[in-house]
Image (cartoon, rainbow, N blue to C red):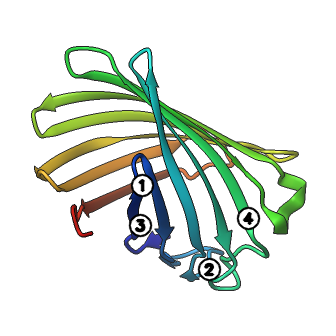
Amino acid sequence: MLDAAETRLRVGVAHCFELVIDAPLYSFAINGPASSGFSDVVASFKWQLPAVLELDSAAAAGIEFPSGSHDLSGQGYDPYLQWSWSRDIRDGWGVAGMFSIFWFTGRSSQNPTFEPTFEVTRDLLPSVGSFVEYVGDYPNHAQPSQVIDSGATWRIARLQQADLHFGFGLNRASPDHFIGFGYSFRLDDLF
C-alpha cells in the first residue's frame, strides 16, 4: 500500500482553541487484497489545556464523514475523543503519549476501539530530533494491532519541518513493516 500526502488544515479561532480538517488521503494498492481510493474527511477541534506539573496536554474531539471510496470509507459518521500529553525531561529528552477512543458505526462489534500511544523523544541537534513510539489499537472483541514507529525530524526553518519514519508490527494483526516521509509547514498570522 502506498499513501499519498496527508493534508491537515488547522485554524486557531480563540486562545488555545483550534478547528481541524483532515482532507481525504489517496491510497494506492500495490499488491494483495488492498483497495485503492480516497479516505474520509475528518472534522475536529482541539483545546490546549493549562499545564500541570510541567505536563502539557490537549483534548480533542472529532467526527469522520463517510465521504471516501466505498471500499475504504466508513459506513457512517465515526466520532472520536482524544487526550494527548507531553513533558520535557532534561538534556533534550522528552516523553509524550496519547489516549484515543473511536466509535465505528459500520463495525459496531469493535466499539469502542482504544488507541494508546507512548513516545520517547531526543533532540540530537538544535534542529534535528528523533523519536521511538509504541502505538496500539485495541478494538472490542477483535485482535489488537501493535506497532513500533521510529524516526527523525528536521526543522528546516522556523515554520517548516521534514520527517522520516519507519517501523514494524509486533503481532499478526499489524503491518510487517512500513516507511514514510513528510514535509509540513505553517502559515502564521493570516488573520
Q: Quadrant of residue 152?
A: top left
Instruction: For label 4, count other residues whose C-alpha is less than 10 Å away and answer few (under 14), some (14-19) or many (20+).
Output: some
Residue 83, image x, y percentages: 58, 39
Which secondary structure, mark 2? loop
Q: Do the CB atoms of the residues marked 2 and 3 lie less than 8 Å apart?
A: no
Nearer the observer: mark 2 or 1; the answer is 1
Q: Quadrant of residue 75?
A: bottom right
Residue 72, image x, y percentages: 65, 76
Which secondary structure, mark 3? strand
- Which of disc 3 and disc 2 is earlier in sequence? 3
Residue that label 2 marks: 35
- Which of disc 4 and disc 1 is earlier in sequence? 1
Q: Quadrant of residue 38?
A: bottom right
Residue that label 1 marks: 14
Residue 120, image x, y percentages: 38, 27
Q: Amino acid at mark 1?
A: Ala
Figure check: 3 above or below 143: below
Residue that label 4 marks: 78
Which secondary structure, mark 1? strand
Tell me what residue is drawn at x 27 percent, y 69 percent: 191
Q: Is residue 20 left or right of residue 186?
A: right
Instruction: For label 1, count other residues whose C-alpha is less than 10 Å away and answer few (under 14), some (14-19) or many (20+).
Output: few
Nearer the observer: mark 1 or 4; the answer is 1
Q: Which residue is nearer to you in this view: 160 or 118?
A: 160
Tell me what residue is drawn at x 65 percent, y 68 percent: 64
Q: Amino acid at mark 3?
A: Arg
Residue that label 3 marks: 8
Instruction: For label 2, count other residues whose C-alpha is less than 10 Å away and answer few (under 14), some (14-19) or many (20+).
Output: some
Q: CA distance from mark 3 to mark 4?
A: 18 Å
